[in-house]
Image (cartoon, rainbow, N blue to C red):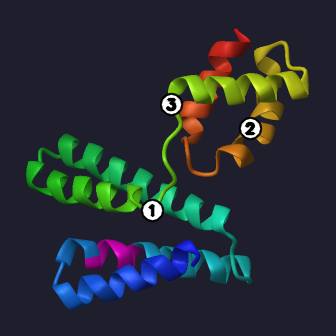
Amino acid sequence: MDIKSTLQSDLQDAIRHGEGTRKSTLRMVLTAIKLAEVEKGAKMDETAYLAVIQKEIKACHEAIADAEKANRPELIPQAEEEIVILQGYLPAALSPAELENMANIAITEVGATSIREMGQVMKVLMPRLQGRATGDQASQMVRKLLQ
């Protein structure tokens, strides 16, 4: 069963059990997936679904930062709960050592020797991560290794 089917099934379960935050979070991500499919004009693959989920998690992190800036602490717990729910659909995160190893492999394959070649390394590395690390984490690691 693909991620989208799992999300739809979990949404039905959340509706049956009256789980409000889970229900709204799953509806939000399914709507984002549907919008991405319409924009693309075709059915998406698992990697694209993971990217949409990561984008929604990033939006929740931004909502937390905005709530802190606006001095609205009552909004933070719901955004944190949404993050926890969405992270449950991502593959297990890479440890820093595993990320460093994958980044070293990508650097070796590209033959990069300076920070100017970071874009080429990222182009090779990001498809391999598939939701197990964020782009920020990957770019920080590559930058550290190329310096």
Position of 62 compared to 77: left or right? right
Residue 26 is inside the magenta segment: yes
Seen at 43% across and 72% down, the residue is: 29
So how many labels did they put on this image? 3
Q: Residues within 10 Å of mark 1 (few under 14, many from 20)?
A: some
- Which residue in the rendered view is the most extreme toward the top? 147
Earlier in the chain: of badge 2 and badge 3, it is 3
Earlier in the chain: of badge 3 and badge 1, it is 1
Identify the main secondary structure in magenta. Answer: helix
Question: In terms of secondary structure, where does tag 1 sit?
Answer: loop
Q: Residues within 10 Å of mark 3 (few under 14, many from 20)?
A: few
Position of 61 compared to 142: left or right? left
Question: In terms of secondary structure, where does tag 2 sit?
Answer: helix
Q: CA gap, disc 2 to disc 3?
A: 15 Å
Start and end of the magenta stretch?
23-28
**Amino acid at the residue labelled 3:** Ser
Circle 3 residue: 95
**Amino acid at the residue labelled 1:** Tyr
Q: CA gap, disc 2 to disc 1?
A: 21 Å
Circle 2 residue: 125
Residue 104, numbered label: none
Quadrant assignment for the N terminus: bottom right
Circle 1 residue: 89
- Establish if 86 lies above or below 1: above
